[in-house]
Amino acid sequence: MSGRDFYAQDSSARASWRLAVLMGANSRTYKFALGQALLEFGWTGREEISLAELAAAYSLGLVQHLAQDPQAPQTVELGEKDFLTVAEQERAVTLEAGWPTERLLAAAVRSMPMMVMQKFHNLRGETAVAHTFYELVGTGRQRVVRLTPDLLRLAQSEQAASLAAELGARWSIVESSFAAGVGRSLVEEGVTVDWDTLKITDKRRRRSVTGIVDAAVGFQHGRCLICGDVLGPGEAIAVDHVFPFSLMRRFDSVGSWHGPDLDALWNLAPAHATCNGAKSDRLPTPAQLARLAARNDAIMHSPHPLRRTLQLSLKHALPGQKAPSWTEFLGAVQTAG
């Protein structure tokens, strides 16, 4: 599923935001720091903010993450003037004060217009998302960031908390790929699911990365996979086995289950707890299978490590056959069930 296909399922500003955050390329984590700052200011309802105000929130958020995990691949050599180099050097004083140092703030104001603010709306292989969320106007110290009506509506919408959680989850996932080293364990193994905590876990470091719901729900457009309605704030959410886990127990009892691991990420989807309870152990409907195939296709176009995890699921799905499409694979599992 390309970004264009993802957007076609929901041609709203929310879909454009999710495309930018969930499916854009990440060689640094700058986009997440900017997105977090934009949501924070958008929630206040202000239509204009100075570039310095945005830079302060942006750099503070990035430094807080930098204290825990790398914000760029470990294989990348950072120069003395690189913003991450400055952020690392100013990290301790910034965290102690709870506010960026003058040097860090100046570096952010200088670098953002030519770097992250030019790239936020861009996608890999495509020009840009359909909606824009800010405009930078003016010159020098008088530069102002105008938040678009789309950004203000998003930041104050019913799904604002979910969008912020999705951004945080994606940030954690990318950090984990930088820390573990994309090209080594994550490329070979992907990530796994810890059912005791309902979290996605980095196999190499045996460390929980982020919750399954926050990591996956954006790729479902914030909707329940079972009924297709929005997962609203305050509603109880469950992680559904789309193909019921009882299938493995049922067939294993006679030693005949040779199907895929139903506890893996490809088969897990956020859903209303009430829908999940009513579904019980029945097989998914054609509509639910179509939603799961679309969701998994969307994840396959996101950066590592979720993409690689699902690639591995397809690669080993049908022994002796080339990797099928998600529609073919899910149809084969349905037949086996």
Image (tube, grey):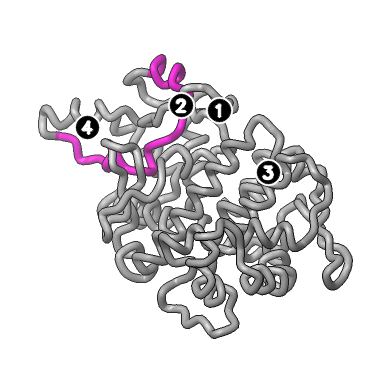
**Residue 260 belongs to the span the image colors magenta:** yes
Going from N to C along the chain, the mark reached first, 1 or 3, is 3
Residue shown at the point (47%, 63%) measured from the top left:
66
Place residue 188 in its image quadrant.
bottom left
User: Who comes first in sequence, dot 4 or dot 3?
Assistant: 3
Which residue position is annotated with label 4?
248
Which sits earlier in the primary sequence, circle 1 or circle 2? Answer: 1
Query: Dot 2: within a 10 Å radius of its alpha carbon, few (fewer than 14), some, or many (20 or more) residues?
Result: some
* Image position of 195 (left or right of 23): left
In front: mark 1 or mark 4?
Answer: 1
Label 1 residue SS: loop
Residue 319, above or below 217: below
Question: Of residues 94 and 155, which is closer to you in this image?
Answer: 94
Q: Which residues are magenta?
A: 256-279
Q: Is residue 295 magenta?
A: no
| Residue found 51% across the figure and 75% down from its top | 89
Spatial separation of the CA atoms under disc 4 and disc 3? 35 Å
Question: Could you say where residue 222 lies in the image, as x and y percent from the top left?
Answer: 57, 35
Q: Report the amino acid beneath label 3.
A: Ala
Within-10-Å neighbours for mark 4: few <14, some 14–19, many 20+? many
Q: CA distance from mark 3 to mark 2?
A: 26 Å
As drawn, the label of residue 150 is: none
Whether the residues at callouts 1 and 4 have beta carbons within 8 Å, the answer is no
Q: Position of residue 257 (x, y in %)?
A: 19, 36
Residue 270, picture quadrant: top left
How far apart are the alpha carbons under marks 1 and 2?
A: 8 Å
In the rendered image, which residue does mark 2 sit on?
237
Q: Which mark is residue 8?
A: 3
The amino acid beneath tag 2 is Ile
Q: Amino acid at mark 4?
A: Met
Q: Is residue 300 above or below residue 292?
A: below
Q: Nearer the viewer, residue 311 or 111?
A: 111
